[in-house]
Image (cartoon, rainbow, N blue to C red):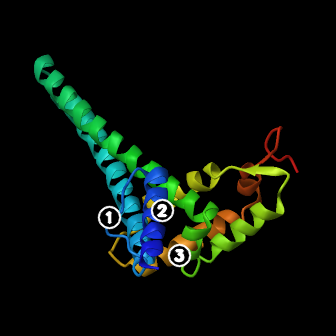
């Protein structure tokens, strides 16, 4: 029985690693919900911080462009800004991919869904919508693109339960928007749902 639990734990870790690019070494059957929710929180917070940093870098560069008249000094500022900018853009993309992956996994994978369904009850509604539309392929991208706004505007104060509760509300607002959900469904062998 212990061996089966270990296999299941390793399977969950591998699923998450494949979808997000991150390995959760501290994930165990008795703490899976908290670890996954913390992961979503940390990824969202980090994504937001990268975006803010990139915005500041742009402002610094614009300010320096206005005041630094020496071409050589300006070139140093530009090169430094570009290097830092590239680092944060790469990190932001990693966090973005991880967030998209974990949301996709929490909807499509029954094991991850069962772990999160109590705190993110909206997942059940999304899964039911997918089941009801057997004629169409489901695309997670429109949901994730709408969630970006939530990740960027959330006030990260360390309260995990309020974050998850607010994430559920954000997902609910997206799911209740007919035009967004219409973009999620593609007729098999055809185009996006027109009806």
- Look at mark 1 in the image and give the residue it sits on: 25
52 lies left or right of 74? right
Mark linked to residue 34: none
User: For numbered disc 3, what is the local secondary structure?
Assistant: helix
Q: Nearer the viewer, residue 60 or 43?
A: 43
Marks 1 and 3 sit apart, C-alpha to C-alpha, by 17 Å
| Image position of 151 with respect to 185: above or below | below
Rendered location of residue 47, percent (x, y): 38, 54
Q: Could you tell which of marks 2 and 3 lies nearer the N-terminus? A: 2
Q: Nearer the viewer, mark 1 or mark 3?
A: 1
User: For numbered disc 2, what is the local secondary structure?
Assistant: helix
Q: In the current view of this chain or complex, which residue is farthest to the top?
A: 71
Q: In the current view of this chain or complex, which residue is farthest to the right?
A: 195
- Look at mark 3 in the image and give the residue it sits on: 115
| Image position of 106 with respect to 165: above or below | above
Rendered location of residue 56, percent (x, y): 28, 46
Q: Nearer the viewer, residue 67 or 52?
A: 52
User: For numbered disc 1, what is the local secondary structure?
Assistant: loop
Marks 2 and 1 sit apart, C-alpha to C-alpha, by 12 Å
Q: Residues within 10 Å of mark 1 (few under 14, many from 20)?
A: few
91 lies left or right of 73? right
């Amino acid at each position: 029985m212990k061996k089966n639990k270990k296999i299941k734990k390793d399977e969950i870790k591998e699923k998450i690693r494949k979808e997000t690019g991150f390995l959760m070494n501290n994930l165990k059957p008795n703490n899976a919900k908290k670890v996954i929710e913390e992961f979503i929180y940390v990824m969202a917070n980090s994504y937001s911080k990268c975006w803010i940093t990139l915005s500041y870098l742009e402002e610094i560069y614009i300010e320096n462009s206005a005041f630094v008249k020496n071409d050589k000094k300006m070139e140093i500022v530009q090169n430094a800004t570009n290097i830092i900018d590239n680092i944060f853009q790469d990190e932001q993309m990693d966090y973005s991919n991880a967030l998209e992956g974990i949301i996709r996994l929490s909807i499509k994978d029954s094991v991850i869904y069962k772990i999160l369904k109590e705190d993110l009850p909206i997942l059940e509604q999304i899964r039911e919508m997918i089941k009801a539309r057997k004629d169409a392929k489901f695309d997670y991208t429109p949901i994730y693109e709408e969630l970006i706004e939530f990740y960027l505007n959330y006030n990260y104060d360390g309260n995990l339960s309020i974050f998850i509760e607010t994430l559920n509300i954000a997902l609910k607002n997206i799911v209740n928007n007919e035009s967004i959900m219409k973009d999620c469904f593609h007729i098999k062998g055809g185009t996006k749902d027109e009806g």
